[in-house]
């Protein structure tokens, strides 16, 4: 009874905030972001994680940005996985970029929500021979509502090779996820992103994004021992 009461209390508090926060910026977005994620299971532990994204800008300058990324994921345990791969970025609103990345993701379940912490290292290489080394930290909480799963999170970006800027940008986001099919999830997300030159001088740019995300998991035919979970 106590757990049910706690869940109901959290929903009653956070759901009105969700709608107020989301509705205030939904029709004032600068960017529409369409994003497809695919996870192809190679075995119980290994999978190939790929995604392709497209951004349309609605500010005075307009333009587009595209990205494609793929990497190998290894599930260390039910709560922790690591992933590494390569990403390509280009478009009228983005410099051509080749990006290597390494993820470390840990999930901590609680009674009424799940806390996820992701640390990502990035090595960016641009066509102008410029190099950038970044650290991204993404804590988020996910909890169930009668509309679907709600996720709240933030993501500061730290530039490691820039002495003048410790935090180059920061994202705050809120999203709602529903299951479209047994292996397909659809997420509607609002993201507020601010970019900084020097942290003490405040932000220099702010963007409001609406992201539509489709997450798709593919399980190939389990015909060989590679796809069987070992009995303990």
Image (cartoon, helix red, strand yellow):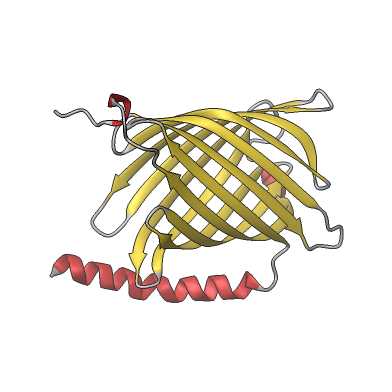
Quarter holding the N terminus is: bottom left
Q: Using residue 140 as the reference point, say whether residue 68 is left or right of it.
A: right
Q: Using residue 131 as the reference point, say whether residue 179 is left or right of it.
A: left
Measured from the top left, where is residue 32 in percent x and y?
A: 68, 60
Of the pair 87 and 27, the residue shown nearer to us: 87
- Residue 181 appears in the rendering: yes
- 33 shown above or below 103: below
The quarter of the displayed image where residue 219 is located: top left
Q: Using residue 75 as the reference point, say whether residue 208 is left or right of it.
A: right
Outermost residue, top side: 129
| Residue at 68% across, 25% down | 161
Quarter holding the C terminus is: top left
| Residue at 81% across, 62% down | 59
- 90 shown above or below 179: above
Of the pair 107 and 47, the residue shown nearer to us: 47
Measured from the top left, where is residue 165 in percent x and y?
A: 69, 36
Of the pair 211 and 137, the residue shown nearer to us: 211
Measured from the top left, where is residue 92 in percent x and y?
A: 83, 47
**How many numbered discs?**
0
- 69 shown above or below 184: above
- 85 shown above or below 197: above
- Residue 122 appears in the rendering: no
Measured from the top left, where is residue 181 in percent x and y?
A: 41, 60
| Residue at 72% across, 33% down | 164
The quarter of the displayed image where residue 5 is located: bottom left
Outermost residue, right side: 61
The quarter of the displayed image where residue 62 is located: bottom right
């Amino acid at each position: 009874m106590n757990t049910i009461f706690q869940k109901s209390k959290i929903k009653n508090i956070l759901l009105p905030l969700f709608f107020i926060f989301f509705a205030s910026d939904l029709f004032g977005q600068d960017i529409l972001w369409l994003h497809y994620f695919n996870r192809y299971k190679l075995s119980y532990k290994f999978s190939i994680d790929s995604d392709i994204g497209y951004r349309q800008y609605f500010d005075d300058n307009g333009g587009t940005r595209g990205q494609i990324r793929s990497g190998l994921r290894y599930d260390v345990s039910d709560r922790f996985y690591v992933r590494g791969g390569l990403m390509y970025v280009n478009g009228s609103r983005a410099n051509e970029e080749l990006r290597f990345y390494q993820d470390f993701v840990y999930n901590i379940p609680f009674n009424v929500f799940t806390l996820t912490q992701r640390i990502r290292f990035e090595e960016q290489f641009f066509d102008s021979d410029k190099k950038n080394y970044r650290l991204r930290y993404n804590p988020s909480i996910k909890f169930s509502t009668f509309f679907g799963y709600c996720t709240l999170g933030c993501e500061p970006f730290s530039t490691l090779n820039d002495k003048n800027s410790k935090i180059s940008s920061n994202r705050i986001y809120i999203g709602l996820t529903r299951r479209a099919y047994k292996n397909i999830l659809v997420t509607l997300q609002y993201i507020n992103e601010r970019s900084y030159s020097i942290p003490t001088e405040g932000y220099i740019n702010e963007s409001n994004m609406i992201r539509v995300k489709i997450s798709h998991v593919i399980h190939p035919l389990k015909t060989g021992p590679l796809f069987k979970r070992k009995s303990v």
